Every structure is written in C-alpha cells, then in structure tokens.
Image (cartoon, rainbow, N blue to C red):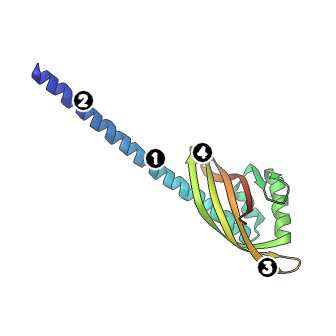
C-alpha cells in the first residue's frame, strides 16, 4: 500500500512538472511570435513615416487596408483608398514633413494590433517655404491581411 501511494505521488509530481514545462514552452513561443509580429508592425510604421517624409502617396496607400480610415486633427476623416489618396495628395501639396516616429507601445492580439507613437520634427508650408516644429501623438489600429500588417485606423493630435 505504501508503495502504491508513493507511486501515485511521484506520478502526480511528474505530471505537474510536465504541465509547468509545457506552459513555459507555450509562453516562450507566444513571446517569440509576438516579437516577430511587433517587428513587422514596427516596419509598417517606419515605412509610413518614410512615406510622409518623402510625400509618397503611393507608399502611404500600400501600408493602409482598403477600408482604412485616416482621422487627422484639423481635416475631414478619409475612409477608403480613394479618400485616403485625395487626403494625402492634398496634404503633400500643402506641406512637407520631416518627422521621426518614436514607437512607444505595440500590443498584438491575433490579427489585430494597436500602436501608440509620437513624432517630432519639422513641417514646411509649401506656399511660403516657412518651416516650424511639428510634434504629435499618434494612435494606429492595424489588421493583418493576407499575412501582412496594414494600417486600418490612424489618428493623431498635437503633443502640446
């Protein structure tokens, strides 16, 4: 009887250890997957920043979903590829940006993620060639479509 009790205790202990090891392995795998996803998302955000700095409407559209929404502080909301194209074209006709994004937070949940960023640099008014400091806080909602992260919703406001 004593041997049977000891055998049961040993098997129980081994089972708990295996479960703990499996949970630890699963958590490490999730962290690695999230790290890869975060790196992909950061790449999208830096590509977007580069598109802003080079006034490249085509590149901007490449990082948005087809139903993407852009909600700038002082301009109308743009929804969908055609409105996004019109909005960014008008912005780039009016100003030149030279800003750098600082990615402060990226959270991933399946095929949806959000990123919180800040940006700092200069904006130049094309009509007057007048340059002034530019500093914003940004919020991005991203979706994974066909294996690629894209901006689904984007809004920003002044840091001041």
In the displayed structure, does residue 34 sit left or right of residue 125? Answer: left
| Residue annotated with mark 2 | 12
Q: CA distance from mark 1 to mark 4?
A: 14 Å
Locate residue 117, reporting x and y percent: 64, 61
Checking the image for residue 111, the label placed there is 4
Q: Earlier in the sequence, mark 2 or mark 3?
A: 2
Which is nearer the N-term, disc 4 or disc 2? 2
Q: Residue at x 22, y 29 (%)?
A: 11
Q: Residues within 10 Å of mark 4 (few under 14, many from 20)?
A: few
Q: CA distance from mark 2 to mark 3?
A: 70 Å
**In-image side of 110 versus 9 (left or right):** right
Label 1 residue SS: helix
State yes or no: discs 4 and 2 in contact (Cβ < 8 Å): no
- Mark 3, residue position: 131
Picture coordinates of residue 96, whole percent (x, y): 78, 73
Q: Residues within 10 Å of mark 3 (few under 14, many from 20)?
A: some
- Residue extending furthest toward the left: 2
The residue under the point 86% across, 65% down is 90
**SS for callout 4:** loop
Q: Secondary structure at mark 3?
A: strand
| Mark 1 Cα shell of 10 Å, populated few (<14), some (14-19), many (≥20) | few
Q: Which residue in the structure is indicated by mark 1?
A: 30
Give the Cα distance between marks 3 and 4: 39 Å
Which of the two discs, 3 and 4, sits closer to the camera?
Answer: 3
Toward the top, the furthest residue is 1
Above or below 14: residue 3 = above
The reply to whether the C-beta atoms of the residues labelled 2 and 3 are less than 8 Å apart is: no
């Amino acid at each position: 009887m004593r041997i049977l009790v000891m055998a049961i205790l040993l098997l129980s202990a081994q089972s708990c250890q295996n479960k703990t090891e499996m949970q630890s392995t699963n958590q490490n795998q999730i962290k690695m997957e999230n790290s890869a996803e975060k790196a992909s998302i950061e790449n999208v955000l830096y590509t977007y920043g580069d598109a802003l700095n080079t006034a490249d409407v085509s590149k901007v559209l490449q990082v948005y979903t087809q139903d993407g929404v852009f909600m700038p502080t002082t301009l109308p909301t743009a929804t969908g590829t055609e409105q996004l194209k019109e909005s960014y074209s008008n912005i780039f006709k009016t100003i030149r940006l030279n800003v750098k994004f600082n990615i402060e937070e990226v959270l991933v949940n399946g095929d949806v993620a959000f990123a919180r960023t800040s940006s700092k640099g200069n904006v130049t008014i094309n009509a007057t060639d007048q340059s002034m400091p530019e500093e914003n806080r940004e919020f991005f909602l991203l979706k994974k479509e066909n294996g690629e992260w894209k901006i689904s919703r984007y809004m920003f406001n002044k840091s001041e």
